Amino acid sequence: MAGLIANPSPFEAALEADFTARSAKNEAQAAAFDRFAKLRLPNRRVEGWKWSDMNAALRSVEPGERVEAEIKPSAFAALDPLEFRIINGRIELPDEPISEGLRYGVVNPVATISELENHPMASLNVALARKALGFEVSDDIAFERPVLIRHINNGAGFSFAQTMMRISPGARLRLIETYEGEGAGFYSHLFHMVVRDGAEFRRAVWQDTGEKSVVNSILAAKIDEKADFQSTGLSTGSRLSRHECHAHFWGAGSSASINSAALVSGERHSDFTTDTQFRAEGCDVVQLHKGVAKDRGRNVFQGKFHVFRDAQKTDAKMAANALLLSDGAEANHKPELEIYADDVECAHGSTVGALDEDALFYLRQRGLDEAAARALLIEAFVGEVVEKFEDEALRDIFASLLKTWLENNE
């Protein structure tokens, strides 16, 4: 009997076997896997994936078992966060009473996300995710304690998880997400959220996983009227890591700050891809990406502003800058504008270069050795993204993580 996927790769065959063996799957999941079977794992011939060949990256991922490992305290533990853990796809809730104004629990995964139905990796996640973390902040609740979601993955094989979040009108939430673990497997996370009228959402992402892992995170955010959305992520890459942010403005007068930085060495690969859609008037977005690559590391940035006809008075600015520290390092940038409104201010820019030799000479003349001078310039370059964090304590932790990476990659 023929399978759902025609001439599957070994990894695709393992995915299909896992899906077929499940006793509990619904029509929506079956439809999602059927879409994936037609779309397949994206490769370099697919627009939007030409620099991040997911099919090639997953060839060497063995369909073996995930393993349990000791979980160390988070680098963000000093912030006293409300901590959730997703360990090899299994969701663990905090062992403490639920605060007033919050609701959370383990729920069934989302059946579909209409704007991502033609996205192969989103379809795969919808088909194979067993459970989701559901989280809601009630109207006008300003929950000041940060929420921490730790994605921890060890061993081989693959795992899938989802988060569904609602920030109700007038509410405020700070979220930290970390991607951790030394596993050599594949992890997929689909994050579907809505930021309602007048709400504020702050998201910080830190990814530092094993060099053989493959990570794909997809955030799909619906942003309503006069909401404020901020997302800033830093990644040290892996065999292939791809963090996507799909921010869609459906209400007038909203704003967003979407920022990212990649620090890759060895043969690590980091991809930050964003799709920002403006469907209402008077929305503002500022986006900044910084990439640092050495050895044979690859930094990929793809950002698109899609301004629909009704989105007059849009103000959107995008900049992507990269530093290449070795001859074999790569930076691939693709900023895009697709504009159908006529009363807008939109701009994008991209630069790729090496460390400024004059600045290095200046620092050397003032007593710094070459390694310290280079580290100081790199820290200042990436620090522009770190400075986007409004909370000083959070900013200090990210600055410390940046310093550690520099010390380990002198």
Image (tube, helix red, strand yellow):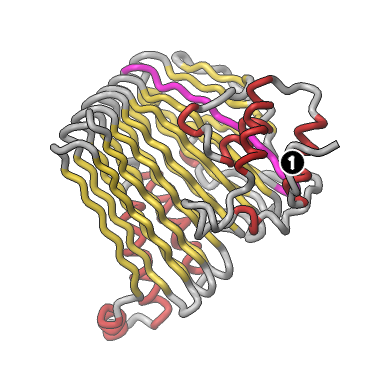
In the image as oriented, which residue stretches furthest toward the right? Answer: 1
In-front residue for pair 39/19 = 39
Q: Residue at x 70, y 50 (%)?
A: 185
- Left or right of 155 in this view: 265: left
Front-most of residues 254 and 86: 254
Residue lying at the far left of the rendered structure: 343
Which quarter of the rendered picture does the N terminus lie within? top right
Determine whether 71 is above or below 225 in the image. Answer: below
Please indicate, yes or no, whether residue 23 appears anywhere in the rendered image. Answer: yes
Q: Amino acid at mark 1?
A: Leu
In the rendered image, residue 311, in percent from the top left (x then y), is placed at 22, 31
Q: Residue at x 66, y 32 (%)?
A: 34
Q: Is residue 5 left or right of residue 82?
A: right
Along the line of sight, the residue nearer the viewer: 275 or 368: 275
Q: Is residue 179 magenta?
A: no
- Left or right of 15, for residue 240: left
- SS for dot 1: helix
Q: Quadrant of residue 250?
A: top left
Q: Position of residue 131 (x, y in %)?
A: 66, 26
Residue at 60%, 53% (x, y): give it.
54
> Residue at the spot x=74%, y=41% of the render?
15
Q: What residue is disc 1 on?
A: 15
Q: Which residues are magenta?
A: 154-169
> As displayed, is residue 179 above or below residue 365?
above
Q: Is residue 78 above or below residue 21?
A: below
Q: Is residue 120 above or below residue 272?
A: above
Left or right of 133, for residue 317: left
Rendering quarter of residue 394:
top left
